[in-house]
């Protein structure tokens, strides 16, 4: 599912971003694949409450978006906008906008048949090593988590305790 390497002749097969209609990502994925396009739709398992029951459903990790590999100079791509489930191809001027190299490849590497694998959130009281930002490399203790995936940390710096916030993906268990 990875994009082909860049040709020396200038033709490039790159990942492009497709905007879909709400909750039609899986439908759009199927229709684009039947047209011969290489498509990557990051998925996740989502818990949904319906009629007082909790159900597990597969949903798009990025609602209303999917990725499509395409050489805009050689492939016919205007038909994508008329595909069932597709709202439009994200454009940059008159050509489809290219996703930066490595982004989709990293998402594919973190995926399996069940969907995108994300490391679990740390628990309050757990010690973690910060991977990015101004406190990179520091050991901190998790104070609390919020619903948006942000973590409140306690750092021991210069003989005192400092509170900081970080994303749970920017840390690993220490």
Image (tube, helix red, strand yellow):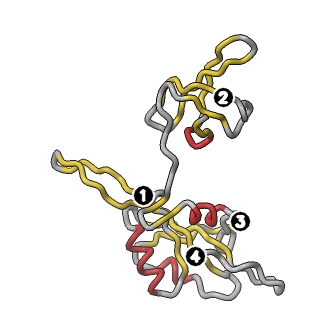
Q: Residue furthest top?
A: 159
Sequence order check: which comes first, mark 4 or mark 3? 4
Q: Which mark is residue 44?
A: 1
Task: Name the element at disc 4.
Answer: loop
User: What x and y, as percent, mark residue 77?
Assistant: 58, 83
Q: Which residue is mark 4?
A: 1
Sequence order check: which comes first, mark 2 or mark 4? 4
Query: Is residue 138 depicted above or below 13 in this figure?
Result: above
Front residue of 32 and 171: 171
Q: Which mark is residue 139?
A: 2
Q: Which residue is mark 3?
A: 101
Disc 4 crowd, CA 10 A, few/some/many (<14, 14-19, 20+): few
User: What x and y, as percent, mark residue 9?
Assistant: 82, 87
Task: Name the element at disc 2.
Answer: strand
Front residue of 28 and 124: 124
- Residue drawn 63% across and 66% down? 105
């Amino acid at each position: 599912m990875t994009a082909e390497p860049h040709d020396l002749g200038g033709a490039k097969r790159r990942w492009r971003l497709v905007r879909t209609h709400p909750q039609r990502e899986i439908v759009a994925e199927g229709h684009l694949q039947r047209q011969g396009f290489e498509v990557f739709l990051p998925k996740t398992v989502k818990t949904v409450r319906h009629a007082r029951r909790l159900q597990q459903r597969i949903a798009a990790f990025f609602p209303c978006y999917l990725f499509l590999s395409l050489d805009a100079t050689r492939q016919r791509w205007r038909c994508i906008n008329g595909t069932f489930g597709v709202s439009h191809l994200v454009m940059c001027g008159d050509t489809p906008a290219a996703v930066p190299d490595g982004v989709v490849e990293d998402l594919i590497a973190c995926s399996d048949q069940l969907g995108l694998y994300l490391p679990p959130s740390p628990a309050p009281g757990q010690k973690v090593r910060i991977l990015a930002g101004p406190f990179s490399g520091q050991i901190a203790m998790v104070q609390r988590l919020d619903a948006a995936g942000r973590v409140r940390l306690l750092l021991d710096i210069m003989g005192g305790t400092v509170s900081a916030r970080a994303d749970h993906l920017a840390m690993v268990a220490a």
